[in-house]
Structures are given as structure tokens and as C-alpha cells.
Amino acid sequence: MESIIIKGGQVINEGKIFPADILIENGRISQIAPQLSQAADIEINAEGKHIIPGIIDDQVHFREPGLMHKADLYTEPRAAVAGGTTSFMEMPNTKPPAVTQAKLEEKYQAAAQKSLANYSFFMGATNDNIEEVLRTDGRQVCGIKIFMGSSTGNMLVDEPTTLENLFSQVPLLIATHCEDEATIRRNMELYREKYGENVPISCHPEIRNVEGCLISSTLATNLAKQYNTRLHILHISTRDELALFDPNTPLAEKRITAEVCVHHLYFNADQYETLGTQIKCNPAVKSVAHQSALLPALLENRLDIIATDHAPHTWDEKQQTYFKAPSGVPLVQHSLNVMLKLHQQGKISLEKIVEKMCHAPSICFEMDQRGFLREGYWADIAIVDLEKNWEVNKSNIHYKCGWSPFEGEVFKGQVSSTIVSGHLAYHEGAFNESKRGERLLFNR
């Protein structure tokens, strides 16, 4: 592999911002020092820019196999890399779903051929596949995914005995989508009776309501406490759920962790009027009262990780009536920009952004030598020009679906270079696809 030296940048890492050069050899960081004089095959001038560890997104839906008209394992990793995300963990609700070891491995093989970013895939749980789940190799697979609300795809796990078996027997991290299905179905029928098929999109957070989230998250945390399960609850969207999580225990010691997604931090229910089904997602974007509680909970470590739940659909699919328009938002290219905007508003520091998007996923999932800028670690790095203004438009959106809820928005701060496992995968607007990303490994 070509060696790379990054010179003159400001490093953001492990709670500090400091000037340093970084030398990369054989895919790994070999030196970090105030000034390095070594020659390298590639020299990147980072003067006036900031250097961060590559973002790790622990929750994406890249739609391959079976839903590749929306997205795939070539297009979406490219979009991720353009936004500074170097590693992703992808969900099992594809067609067919990744609910056997054979189907799971097929996704890994596809990513090895296509993905510009580093990759891992969750093994999916169903009501009747615990034997397959228990065969999962924790060294090579990020975790087990349980849909405790059906969301997108037919993977609802709702049988109490099945849930108890999974929580009591699975030794790996279990990631859950928590929305109570009975509550949602009851609400759907009430709103269908009132509006027919023309339910206003503004009713989405009333149908997939706070109560449904809290019932399911409470069940998951109770099961985890009963069986000492390693539980990670995805995309927390309500203030009511926050009391379930411990802000005081160090992350590496927590048995129950939680994440917040950028769209729940950025959008609120008032924006259904202008954005409509573009921000229809599960769990729903909720009121300002819930939105405004999430960032403080992140800052006090009740919420541990920032992710995206990147879930693209075509524009035409999203333009359908309420019940037909699928839930999900394309976000992975712009997650850092959302957080930088919150930083510019004085709401979160650069150091905390790096902690929650880079360090915390590594710690939470026990990743092998990623998520930090340390000598000897894999060189997953994003170089960011914090002063660069740019507008999101069709010409610079890399998602296969071709649209974003941020279109027309001017962001301040843009990724200029992204290095994936020591490979300069993206530089000044151009991709270098001569090398693919690596399969993520875990210290378990």
C-alpha cells in the first residue's frame, strides 16, 4: 500500500485538539507527532483543516440484497466515505433477510467486492431462528439485531418466550428496535377509521407514539437486567425513555447502552408541514419537547452513540399516501454536517462530536483497533475544512436514491479527504476505488 503523510492539521482525538502530522504505512498509523519529516508516497496538506478519526455508523440500511433499486453496497458506502464515515454496521432486513449464517456471509462477500468503506453486518433474529443466531461468531460479526417493532421488513420478534430465550442465551451484543407493535397497530386502526387512507403525515408521531417506544424499551431493559444481556437500544427518540439509561457508569463497563440518530436531533414534528414524508421514519420524528431533551442526554452520557439509521427509498416511493409511503431517511453522507451545525450553534463541542461518532462506537462494540487516532491502529481518518460552505444539491448527493431532506441547505464544514484502512478513498471530490474497505473485527 502507498504510504501517506498528513501535514499541518489540527487533530481532534480523545478529548483534545492539537497540531500534529500523521504518517500512515501499511494501512495503519505509524507515527503521530508535532512535525514529521519523513517522505511518503502521498502527502496531504491539512493546513487550516481538522483531522478526526473516521466516523463509525453502527446503524445503516444499504438495501442489498433484494431492494437494490433504492441503494446497494457500492453506492451507499461511497456516500458514507464522502461524508467522513469510514466504517458501517448494516441491518439484516433485506430481501431475503440475513437470518441464517449462509445469508449473512453472502452479504459479507458482496461487501468485500463492492464497499469502499469498512463493513460489518448484524445477524437478524426471528421468532424461530435461535439456533442460527447462536452460531454467530462475535469476533467477525458486530451483533444480533432484534426488531421489537416490525418497522421495515417482516422481522418482528414479539413472542415472549422467544425474547426470553434470546436475551438469556445470546452472549453477543443485542441491538434492538424498540416500538410496541400492539400499540402501533391499535393507533393505526384508529387513524384509519378517522381519515381512511389519507392520514396526514403530521399524525405519524401520534401513531408511532411515545407510549409505544417506552413500553418496548422498558421491556428490553428489564429483560437485559434480568439476564445480564449486553443490550444496545437503537435510535432513542423520546424524553420519556431517557430515565432507562445510566449516565454515570463508564461506557466500557455498561451492559445497557443507547444511541441517538442525527435526524431525531435535527428535525422535529413542526417540519412535517414542509418536509412531509421525507422525514417519515421509525421511530417517528417527534415534538420539539422530545427533540430538545435528546442532546442534553447525549452530553451527559445517558445516550452513548450518534448514528444515522440511514434508510433510503426512492423519491416516488416516498410521495405515496401515509400508509404506503415507506419509513426511512437517507442520512449517512450528511451526518457529520448535522453535528457540525449543532456545534456552530454552540450546542456541542468538536471533541464531544468525535467522542460520540468515533470513539464511542468502537468502545461499545469492542472494535479491533479502530475509532481512535493512535499509533498502530488502522488508519481510518477524515480531514475536514470547518470553514468551507457548500450547498446540498442533486449534483453532490451520492445516494442511489438521489435525494436528501437537506437539499438546498448550506452547511459550513466539508470533508476534503477520507482515508479508509490506510487507503485514500476520497480526496477533493474524487473517489479512488482501487481498494475496498476491510471487514471489521471485534475483540470478543
Image: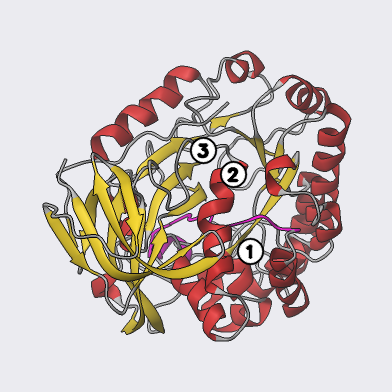
First along the sequence among labels 2 and 1: 1
Q: Which residue is mark 2?
A: 363
Q: Which type of secondary structure does the marked residue at label 2 adopt?
A: helix
Side of 115 where 434 appears, left or right:
left
Q: Which residues are magenta?
A: 302-319
Q: Position of residue 157 (x, y in %)?
A: 70, 33
Q: Are marks 3 and 2 in contact (CB under 8 Å)?
A: yes
Side of 216 where 421 appears, left or right:
left
Which secondary structure class fits the magenta region best?
A: loop
* Residue type highlighted by circle 1: Glu
Q: Which type of secondary structure does the marked residue at label 1 adopt?
A: loop
* Mark 1 or 3, closer to the camera: 3
* Residue type highlighted by circle 3: Met
Q: Which residue is mark 1?
A: 197
Picture mark count = 3
Q: Is residue 105 above or below residue 34?
A: above
Distance between mark 1 and mark 3 Cα atoms: 45 Å
Is residue 307 covered in magenta?
yes
Distance between mark 3 and mark 2 Cα atoms: 7 Å
Q: Position of residue 147 (x, y in %)?
A: 66, 39
Which residue is pictured at 72% across the width and 79% down the height? 288
Q: Name which quarter of the figure residue 252 lies in.
A: top right
Q: Is residue 102 above or below residue 348?
A: above
* Residue type highlighted by circle 2: Ile
Q: Position of residue 1 (x, y in %)?
A: 16, 40
Q: Are marks 1 and 3 in contact (CB under 8 Å)?
A: no
Q: Which residue is mark 3?
A: 367
Q: Position of residue 404 (x, y in %)?
A: 41, 70
